[in-house]
Amino acid sequence: MDATTSVSMLAAAWDALFIILDPMRLGVLGFAALLGVILGIVPGIGGLAGTALLLPFTFTMDPYTAFAFLLGLGATTSTGDPIPAILFGVPGGASSAATVLDGLPMAKRGEAGRALSAAYMSSLMGGLFGALLLGLAVPVLRPVMMFIGTPEMLAISILGLSMVAALSSSTPLRGLAAASIGIMISMVGSEPRTGTFRWTFESLYLWEGIPLVPITLGLFALPELCDMAISRHSLKGKPQQNVNQNIWQGAVDCFENWWLILRCSWIGTALGAIPGIGGSVVDWVAYAHAARTVKDGQKTFGTGDVRGVIASESANNAKEGGSLITTIAFGIPGSAGMAIILGAFISQGLVPGPDMLTKNLSITYSMVWSIAIANIVGAGLCYAFSSQFAKIATLRYSLVLPIVVSIIFIGAFEGSRQWGDLYALLVFGAAGWTMKRLRWPRAPLILGVVLGDTIERQLFISIRLYGAEWMLHPLVFIILAIAVIGIVRPMVSTMLARRGKTRVGPLFAAPRFSMVDLFPGLLLCCLTFLMFRTVGWPYTTLLVPRIVTGTAIVVIALSLLNAVFKRGVPVPVLADGQEADNAPLHMDLVEINDDLTNREVLMRAGRFFCWLLGFFASMATLGIISTIPIFIIGFMRYEARERWTLVLSMAFSMTLFVYVVFDQLLTMAWPATLLGTLVPALKVIPSM
């Protein structure tokens, strides 16, 4: 880059800053940041839906104002996401799922303020770093991106899966199995090349696949709410410490771990710049990286280590700058949100590519400033209300649970706005709670769902173009070698540790079966059936599904054999089945109910899911706005005998909130109801 180019870039950046600091544009940017934080707090809605809904309002704006509004909203959604993740264990979006692992345990022990503050500050630092990299990388990015081909993208996706799977438990076999099942779920629906329907079982809903939102909320949100209903306590496990001091400590933690933030921000920006990887991946990859590299990470991550919150949130916000890079330079959106931003390019008469790096350079740098300023405003808004957010962790479960359940049903329905989204929510909720109790990792499964489409497409293209030689590309070979080492190393370490504890005895013990082994056995039966269903599919359709299904069958069978023929004296375990001493990180939450028998746990869990089924049935009959007051009144009175004044005020307030925000402002298209169909005159009632 010559001196003239550097001077012109600096001049464009300086001009863009003054343009964005115009009071009117700054006000629009601040309003967008506020909307982004609010949308991030509401589980399942997120910035994608908000950006899509608000895009038409930018058509009459000039390019600087339009992009300031859209990017300000999108950049701060990730700042609001960790609030419900930390306080309730409910990810505000799929990209904050990893934050739950350490944020929720911190809230339970009275450190909600510290966790929230660490999330805000790391989000701010990560967002600023991502914006800085965007500003520096745009002119020099093209040669780098052109070097990354189909095999390289496939290898990067496999590496991301392997990093999470390898850290999933004392053996990575369950992690690999969960990841494979997640990829299979992503393949449900119409195959794009031939139109063949895969594993749809003649269901119209499954033709286009299962949306990510109900899967995420089912796997991560409902199990935490179910455990809250089982334990019947507030989120905190210890008295809340001084909130303001906690908030200050969270900010200090970020500055003490600045090198971790820098590394994870690099990861977020780099993965965000790769089209197809998506924002739902970066937090898990950054979390896995941090767990491997920080001191004692594999012992403390997942138990309430603030560094886990810092790692996932810094990468999460940094990805926005990375995903905008490919959108500006090549017109290839790095994420679904950037696909909407690409629509804004078209509406403004702009063409992504060389023009954005030459004659429209000031607009490009206005985007950089918009992301940077929005992150500052978003973090400031969150800090202003942190003490109030932290107090939510002290509320009784009977006050929190019915409100969060109502929002989750609305968020899940936002997936594709079909009844099938709610069926998927309940199915994955039950599956998620079962996996959590049996210590099967959920993180690789959701990562497999997110990356499945990319992996299938890139694997098919790589095999067709290069055959098996795609694995011999230099960069691919290096990346896959790292992935294999990451998988094999924990397996070898576990075997050596177990051998050191037993020292004597046969290689394998006599087989021992337990009720826990029924779960992998059931999975094997289901996977075998699904493999049989591929018979008759065209070759292009069945190639990748058979590879993935076969992999899942093999690793689950090995995991089952490992459990049944475990050698020698078993490693001491805790009450919930987690290995006690020097156990590797399990990327999941631990819920211990020492005072409850298994029968009591199952009874309370069954009652919780009955409440969910009742909500679903009432929603199908009366509509969600009519169902919310009925559900809140019924749950609060029957479960906790709350006083009537509190119950009625909560029911009225929540119903009014849903009506104003979702029905009037967001104008959501509610599903048809039974009464509304039978008596059309009743359709004047909202959501009926």
Image (spheres, rainbow, N blue to C red):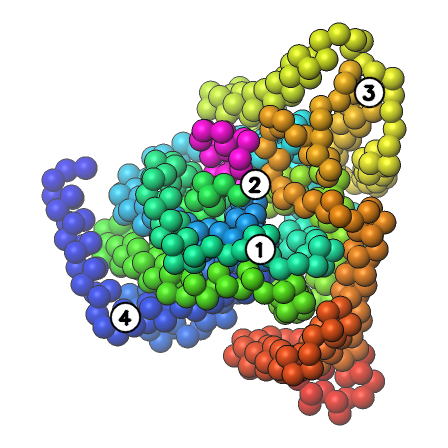
> Which circle's residue, 3 or 2, is located before the other in the chain?
2
What is the magenta range?
284-302
Quick one: label 2, few (<14), some, or many (20+) residues within 10 Å? many
Return the mark for residue 347.
none
**Circle 1 sits on which residue?**
236
Residue shown at 40% from the left, 68% from the top: 34
The quadrant of the image that shows the C terminus is: bottom right
Quick one: label 3, few (<14), some, or many (20+) residues within 10 Å? some
Q: Which amino acid does label 1 sit on?
A: Lys
Q: Do the residues labelled 3 and 4 touch (CB within 8 Å)?
A: no
| Among the 4 quarters of the image, the one containing residue 217 | bottom right
Quick one: label 4, few (<14), some, or many (20+) residues within 10 Å? some
Where's residue 360, x and y in %? 25, 57
**Circle 2 sits on which residue?**
303
Answer whether residue 514 is magenta in the image.
no
Where's residue 79, x and y in %? 43, 57
Where's residue 96, x and y in %? 52, 51
